[in-house]
Image: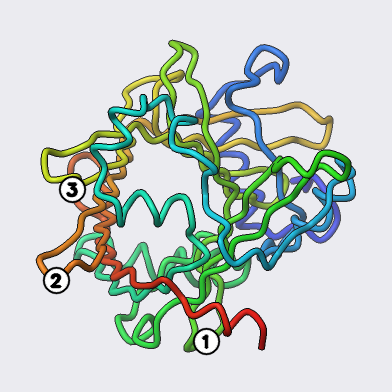
Amino acid sequence: MMFDYPSQRFQDWLCQRWVMARGRRIDPAENEWLMGPFGNVDVVADNYVQRLAEDEDLRIDPSEPNAGLFENLEALGLSSDHTNRIHPTIRDFYLHTARYELDAWCEWSRLFRPAGFMMGSLYGRRMQQLNIPTRPLDTAAGLQSRIIQLREKESGAVRYTVWHRQLKSTGDIVFSGIYGAGSLPNGAQCLKAVFPLPRGNATVFLRHEIGPDGSFDLIADGKRFGDGGLYFLLTDRKGRIWSQYVSRLHETLSNYVDNDGVMRTNHDSYYWGRRVFHVHYRIHGPRDRDRYDA
């Protein structure tokens, strides 16, 4: 057995063999829609941000109090009429995410809970990435949410937007991803989220639906390579790129505003039609600007 790089963990090597065995080798030039930043070895956290800025000669702006995941929702292929149908609170959250605080409650199904504990022990907590809590008390104190923008030095234009979320109770990172708009091969515009992993990433494409009540759903439910959904990418020791599309895993994020005017999000993950976990977010704000001056 030969590891792809020094100090590689066996479990990382094993997962990468799975991607190569079940996936396909791809040409980055022919699959630009799928490509995104890769992570470093072992611990991911937000270590990739500085390296990404250096590699692409960008400026890091970690403290803009009004920063959002998007500068405008038309980037997702929404017309102004469609954008106006989204509840104003939800729209403001996506345009000014840094203003908001997040509380979360997480529940794993009985069937998948053992796998959740194993994944957390072997990967999530060590890598500080895709570290979905398995104990309800872990999220009791809420999440610290940060928006980090990487900008062009001359024009100031945003190249990458990083959404970094960690548990206030333990400091463990739950998600650290790069968010933006992406186009599938069929031309459909989606939300594209890239989560760097050791020598690779997990990339999710989510289509959008607007409900009659102004709710805004993001859905990953494709069936084949080129559809929306979850892709794992990695580079092997020869620099070749591999990708595995996980067609049986579907994700739904349902954003709505309750009767008290509070924004809430239900994040549900399904495998073979069975729910894996459910995360409920209570999203409240805007934050007091004085907190950024402290």
Q: Which mark is residue 170?
A: 1
Q: Which residue is mark 3?
A: 274
Q: Position of residue 126 (x, y in %)?
A: 61, 71
- Sequence-wise, the earlier of marks 1 and 2 is 1
Q: Residue at x 34, y 86 (%)?
A: 140
Q: Position of residue 68 (x, y in %)?
A: 53, 53
In the rendered image of this protein, does residue 208 appear above or below residue 201?
Answer: above
Q: Nearer the viewer, residue 249 or 206?
A: 206
Q: Nearer the viewer, residue 289 or 179?
A: 289
Asked if labels 3 and 1 touch by Cβ distance under 8 angstroms, the answer is: no
Q: Give the foreground label among 1 and 3.
A: 1
Q: Which mark is residue 260?
A: 2
- Sequence-wise, the earlier of marks 2 and 3 is 2
Q: Name the element at disc 1.
A: loop
In the rendered image of this protein, does residue 210 appear above or below residue 48?
Answer: above
Q: Give the foreground label among 1 and 2.
A: 2
